[in-house]
Image (cartoon, rainbow, N blue to C red):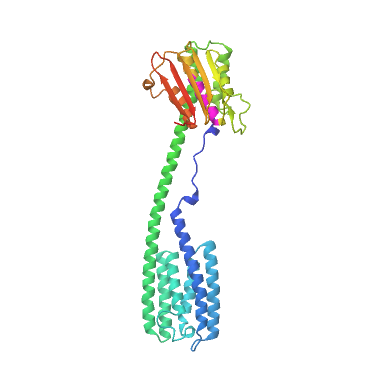
């Protein structure tokens, strides 16, 4: 079997390595971006609605223009590239500077009650900082905004408002930081568990692939060299006969991988349809080719026209070859029949002989002929195998595709 015929293990997509973390990052990017944008635009409208002294209108207009532009750029930048340290630092810096300008931006009559547009701006900034960065950075950033608001409100002659909203900001910092940290830790554990599952799954796929390769090699060896030597030793194939030379040449080609093997059966290696992407293949033609390659065995064949997918035809042909080879090795003088019936859903192949028979339950597990060469190949394409035999009563092997039982 050539190395190119071994299917590679599927590689996992890197995007699935941390699905929970990716979803969390998407949430903690999208929500702050939308929150900053909506609060920035709404805050601009509210800020311009009250311009009574000591509000300095030119300064207010300049601050509103800068904050509005920043809110739009923050949202676009966050949605396109995510939220990083410089973006958080810029947001905290602008908000802190705005808080220090409270005496000239917010009218005294609307400042108390923690409902001014600057109070909303400060709350939005500290919440976004906790959601988008680690606690070791977000908490100092939130405290800086809190200090800026306390200073600005105090300068505006509203110490009560300063104390009230400072308490609110501290609660917002604490709750948001705890929630974000807990979510990151839990989701990190989920991603690590998922990563462990992926590694175990990859190892299982590799192990399963290795076992399948080993089974294929063993089947090929069993159905080629070992089968030929056994038949020669039993006298089923005369030494020096053209059939023996052709069989040995086929065995060598299969083992060297010079052609794509049919699973070691040696069947249809010269089929001109090989390599074409046909949707169906003539199973009856393939089985007739088998009989031509077994001149030492007398077989009565009843083969109805039947077309099945190429991989199914290949597997059933290989299984039939193995069944007929068993007859040639163990009951070469038996009367043998080969039948093919095309059903409404698939195909049925039967190999029957009146040889000495055997007890299927007594076949050793290390014997590949029946277990792998016949049953394994048929089941690999979704078929089913039934073996009916007992000592002194011959053997009947029935291959069904698909398995409709």
Against 205, is 60 above or below?
below
Query: Looking at this view, is 57 or 303 the one in front?
Result: 303
Q: Name the residue at 40% across, 85% down.
A: 158
Against 181, is 243 above or below?
above
Identify the residue at the far bottom of this view. 53
Q: Is residue 140 magenta?
A: no
Against 296, is 397 above or below?
below
**Which residue range is magenta in the image?**
311-323
Query: Looking at this view, is 216 or 110 the one in front?
Result: 110
Residue 213, horizontal then vertical, whole percent: 48, 31
Residue 353, horizontal then vertical, whole percent: 46, 15
Q: Name the residue at 43% across, 82% down.
A: 152
Q: Name the residue at 54% across, 31% down.
A: 311
Quadrant for residue 166, please give it: bottom left
Is residue 264 visible to the viewer in this orientation of the structure? no
Residue 315, horizontal then vertical, whole percent: 52, 28
Is residue 385 visible to the viewer in this orientation of the structure? yes
Q: Main secondary structure of the magenta part?
A: helix
Identify the residue at the far front of this view. 344
Residue 121, horizontal then vertical, whole percent: 46, 75
Identify the residue at the far right of this view. 272
Q: Name the residue at 51% across, 82% down.
A: 49
Quick one: quadrant of the C terminus?
top left
Query: Looking at this view, is 297 or 160 the one in front?
Result: 297
């Amino acid at each position: 079997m050539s190395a190119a015929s071994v299917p590679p293990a599927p590689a996992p997509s890197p995007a699935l390595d941390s699905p929970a973390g990716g979803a969390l990052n998407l949430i903690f990017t999208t929500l702050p971006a939308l929150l900053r944008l909506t609060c920035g635009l709404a805050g601009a409208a509210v800020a311009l609605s009250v311009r009574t002294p000591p509000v300095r209108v030119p300064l207010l207009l300049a601050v509103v223009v800068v904050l509005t532009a920043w809110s739009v750029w923050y949202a676009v930048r966050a949605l396109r590239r995510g939220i990083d340290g410089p973006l958080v630092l810029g947001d905290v810096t602008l908000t802190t500077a705005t808080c220090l300008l409270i005496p000239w931006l917010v009218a005294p009559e609307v400042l108390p009650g923690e409902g001014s547009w600057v109070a909303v701006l400060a709350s939005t900034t500290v919440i976004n900082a906790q959601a988008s960065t680690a606690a070791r950075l977000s908490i100092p950033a939130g405290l800086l905004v809190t200090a800026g608001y306390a200073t600005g409100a105090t300068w505006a002659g509203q110490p009560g408002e300063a104390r009230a909203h400072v308490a609110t900001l501290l609660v917002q910092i604490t709750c948001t930081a705890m929630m974000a940290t807990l979510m990151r830790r839990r989701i990190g554990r989920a991603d690590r568990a998922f990563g462990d599952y992926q590694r175990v799954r990859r190892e299982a796929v590799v192990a399963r692939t290795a076992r399948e390769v080993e089974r294929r090699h063993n089947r090929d060896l069993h159905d080629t060299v070992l089968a030929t030597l056994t038949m020669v030793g039993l006298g089923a194939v005369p030494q020096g006969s053209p059939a023996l030379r052709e069989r040995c040449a086929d065995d060598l080609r299969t083992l060297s991988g010079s052609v794509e093997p049919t699973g070691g059966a040696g069947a249809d290696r010269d089929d001109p349809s090989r390599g074409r992407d046909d949707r169906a293949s003539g199973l009856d033609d393939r089985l007739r080719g088998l009989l031509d390659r077994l001149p030492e065995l007398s077989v009565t064949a009843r083969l109805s026209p039947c077309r099945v997918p190429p991989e199914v035809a290949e597997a059933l042909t290989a299984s039939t070859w193995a069944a007929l080879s068993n007859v040639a090795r163990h009951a070469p003088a038996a009367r043998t029949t080969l039948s093919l019936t095309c059903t409404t859903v698939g195909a049925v192949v039967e190999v029957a002989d009146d040889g000495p028979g055997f007890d299927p339950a007594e076949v050793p597990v290390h014997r590949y002929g029946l277990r792998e060469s016949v049953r394994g190949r048929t089941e690999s394409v979704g078929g089913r195998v039934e073996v009916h035999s007992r000592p002194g009563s011959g053997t009947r092997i029935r291959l069904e595709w698909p398995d409709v039982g």
